[in-house]
Image (cartoon, rainbow, N blue to C red):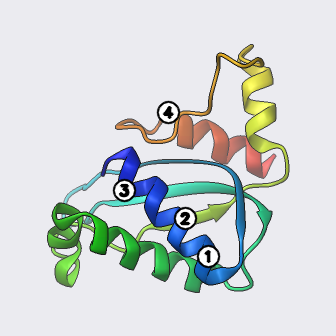
Amino acid sequence: MIIENAEEALKLVCLKTNTEIKDYTAGPVFMKGKKKGSHEWIIEFRKSPEDLNYFTELLDNALKSLNSDYEAKRYNNITLEMPKVHMARENLFYDWLKINDKLGGQHKIPRLSNRRDYIEKLLRMSSS
């Protein structure tokens, strides 16, 4: 997945669901044994979706329509399963930037990562 596809997919889904996103990040869920991989998203909404499962389904479909490689891997769940989307608590990303001494205009939330470190830390912060 590339950032342009992620941004465009989120934009399309927000229009269809009348939602607004404040911040987000996405990372991999790695294949392990017979378990398939997926993408895991943490999204902080300004205006939340009424149904997160529907939002996730639309996101998956938008990504398929924008990225043929993603679509091929999602076909019949061959390699990738449905994305996992978590609704972030308010100010989660701001708190993450603050804890990591990255507040200010030059630092941004990593949008897409090939590693799980951002996702893991944000999930821990979200549940505490």
Amino acid carrying label 4: it is Asp
Q: Name the side, left or right, on which 48 lies relative to 9.
A: right
- Residue at 16% x, 62% y: name it: 69
Circle 4 or circle 3, nearest the eye: 3
Q: Name the side, left or right, on which 59 lies relative to 106.
A: left
Query: Element at badge 1?
Result: helix
Find residue 117 and name its label.
4
Q: Nearer the viewer, residue 1 or 29?
A: 1
Q: Are marks 2 and 3 in contact (CB under 8 Å)?
A: no
Q: Name the side, left or right, on which 60 lies relative to 47.
A: left
- Residue at 47% x, 82% y: name it: 57
Disc 3 designates what residue?
5
Q: Are marks 2 and 1 in contact (CB under 8 Å)?
A: yes
Q: Are marks 4 and 2 in contact (CB under 8 Å)?
A: no
Q: CA distance from mark 1 to mark 3?
A: 15 Å
- Residue at 41% x, 37% y: name it: 113
Disc 2 designates what residue?
11
Disc 1 designates what residue?
15
Amino acid carrying label 1: it is Leu
